[in-house]
Image (spheres, rainbow, N blue to C red):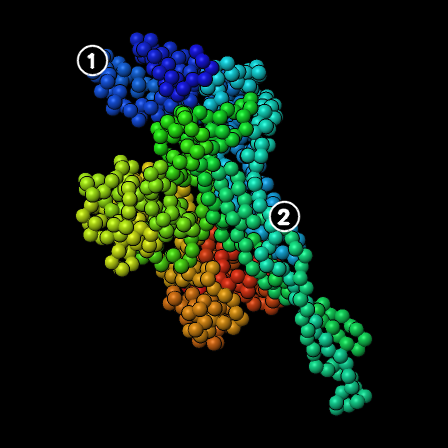
Amino acid sequence: MSENKDSQDIAKSVMDGSKSAGKKVLGGKNMLKMLSKGSKFALKMLKFIMEKIVLVILKAVIGFFGPYVLLVIGIIILLLLVIDSIDVFDIHQEGGKREESQILFDETVLEVVKNRNEEGPTSIRNALRETQNDSLYPSISESWLYQTGELMKISYAVPSILHYYKNLKNENYRPWHKDFDVRDVSTEALKQKVKNDFTKVISKEWDYFYSDSTYEPDLVWGTPPKEEYKEIRTTRRCLRPSANDPDEMEYGPETESIQKVVLPTREIVLSMTLLYNSADVPYKDYESDWSSEEVKESGDCEVKKSEKYFLYILDDGAPPSVTFSPTTLVSFLTGTAPEGKLTQHIRPVDVEYTLDLGKEVDPAFPSVVMDFPKFIKCAQKSDVLGCITEFVTGGSSGFGGSINGMWYPANYLAIYQAAGDKYKVDWWILASIHGQETGFSSNPVASDPSKGSKDANGNFVGAVGHMQFMPMTWVGWGVRNDPAYDTSDLGHIMGDLSFLKEPSNIRKYGGFGVDGDGDGLADPWNLQDAVFSAANYLSRSGYRPGNEESIKNALHSYNQDWSYVSEVLARGSMFAGNFANGEVGGNRQTIINAGMTWVGNSRYVLGGGRTDRDINNYICDCSSFVRWAYYQGGYDFGKPSNTNTQTIKKHGRAVSLNQAQPGDLIFWDTTGYKDSHVGIYIGSGKWIGCNTSSGVAVSNVDSDYWMSKFKGHVRSILP
């Protein structure tokens, strides 16, 4: 037999082996022995094949074997049960027969792979810290750095399946763990010593893989797009004879001057890529407060100096938007991954099965949408990379380490809520789907019908619009019975798609698209129409708020990928938690929702926010913003012109930070004066307020800067 085996040959050999095992199927011992000789990966593929073609197999078996059909079915069922019973991370491929030390070895392999997968995110975090390591820059939120690293992290299934594949495809391959005898792990002390030995050996063997440039972060460095500078304010007053008594001296009037000093140019990280994940690093303008005045005597004069900095800093108010490249993932697995003692490239014919295995190893492994039969056929006679580019049409990141995607834009909240209210669907689920599908419409395919994947004939394929509906799902699957349109079993419609927008066509063919904004069209490239249509789809798929099973099933109907369901729920819960967190209700909810609509589109002006014109242009200072948000929730602090932090703090009662509820007020001493700044606590350690450097923004209470300004003053205004 040749050294490399096709997946179909492996599955056939396992089925052939099952014939001799048929007479002893009830004993189980011989069956397990047979399975232990094969590869667990082969069994995974066998399971995959059975699930895909089980009806065809049953028809063939009934036709050819007649009375033996029950025996064959029994064997298949037993195989599936055994497959599901084998531990995923079974490097020894021996299932339940493993010795204790072998089980420990497998567990250590998983631990080492996961730990070494942290090297990339750690490098990214360190590089981002380096951009602001000077004391004049505000400290970066560690929670933001952690989440950014998690979003960029690669699934630990990537090296794992390459290793499985090496073991599977090469009959002469001697697994590297076979170099070690079975170890004594009868006591905890012995077990720990053996584990330490295993860790050193395993990590060393993986060095060639993790040190390869393809698996290390690619950081693009550059200079800030605008100059950074400081202003030095100098105030001088000098002694002079008193106008009333020439023998007495008094200070004359103060003179003030401001000097601009441009800071040296520095390097910052502009963008980052880690294998299949990439993101632009978010930055924002920052204006510091004036520093404490330094007072010096100069002859008969008193000179005061203070400084203010104008900087370009990391925007750690929300996680970056990470883009997943399914073509990069498939290219890595099939050709660019480092090969060596433990890993081997995957042949095109086996890509579908190895991607399926990735989900078995790590539920957060990315999903790839591709036409596998056409890809295999193409790869037999063409460049594999070109075939990948042509037949990989999409995918879902799987949130490699954490929750994928950025915070939703505040101005979209009203759309999510209106659609959710109409169709009885949680608004935060709609927001999460929007982030998952098109990065909150940052992907050009969201709003531009001319963008998207095309087949060899130039026809658009794949989902369309802001919420990524398949064209036939939008207009209705009844369209496939209309000879006027060329359709596919996957939901594509060839040619001009403008007819999707006509509500009459949607009614005719039974689709889910709706006219959300009342303009007479149901347009998937219109955000409001798309969000309302997604809510309509979920509602008609059985979505019931508060019922987790119905929510999961409706999401699975939207996208038949359980990792997609998990990611949407995780991100959505984050959105909901920062508002509700099980505690916000009534007026508190309204206040926070109103305040969030100002994030990212407002401007700080001292004394601003006290006229209708300012409010309409999102101009505020800290106290006017709080007054406006509270007013939306039905609480009035009094006339805008009379409202400031000192009048606001007279309302309600003082509580500790540990007792703070979303909607409570939190005060800061930012100018050296007590309670000179105020914001609204929104839960989960975050607060929202109008700041001099950013306008209205969400910040972490426990950041170094804000904790240095916090003196313990929190007030609860509402019941």
Q: Which mark is residue 151?
A: none
User: What residue is pinned by disc 2?
Assistant: 130
Query: Can you identify the residue that label 1 sits on?
Result: 66
Q: Is residue 439 above or below residue 326?
A: below
Label 2's element?
A: helix
Q: Is residue 514 above or below residue 67?
A: below
Q: Position of residue 89 (x, y in %)?
A: 47, 25
For residue 313, what is the image quadrant?
bottom right
- Give x and y (percent) for residue 390: 40, 36
Residue drawn where x is 45% and y is 71% of the image: 614
Q: Residues within 10 Å of mark 2 (few under 14, many from 20)?
A: few
Image spot of residue 464 (x, y percent): 33, 46
Above-or-below relation of 108 to 299: above
Amino acid of disc 2: Glu
Q: Is residue 158 visible?
A: no
Say what amino acid the circle numbered 1 marks: Gly
Q: Can residue 165 be seen in the rendering of this structure?
A: yes
Label 1: state its secondary structure. helix
In this view, the residue farthest toward the bottom is 244
Q: Earlier in the sequence, mark 2 or mark 1?
A: 1
Q: Residue at x 45, y 17 (%)?
A: 4
Between 129 and 226, the one nearer to me in the picture: 226
- Tell me how far mark 2 sits from mark 1, CA to CA: 72 Å
Q: Residue at x 68, y 69 (%)?
A: 259
Q: Provide residue 553's location: percent of width, then percent of height.
A: 30, 40
- In this rendering, position of residue 181 left or right of residue 259: left
Query: Depth check: 707 or 135 in front?
Result: 135
Q: Nearer the viewer, residue 322 or 191?
A: 322
Q: Is residue 484 above or below residue 515?
A: above
Task: Estimate how packed mark 1 is, as few (under 14), some (14 to 19) or many (20 or more) residues with alpha carbons within 10 Å.
Answer: few
Which residue is painted at 28% across and 44% down in the image?
Answer: 495
Please state if 263 lies on the left or on the right of 613 as rendered: right
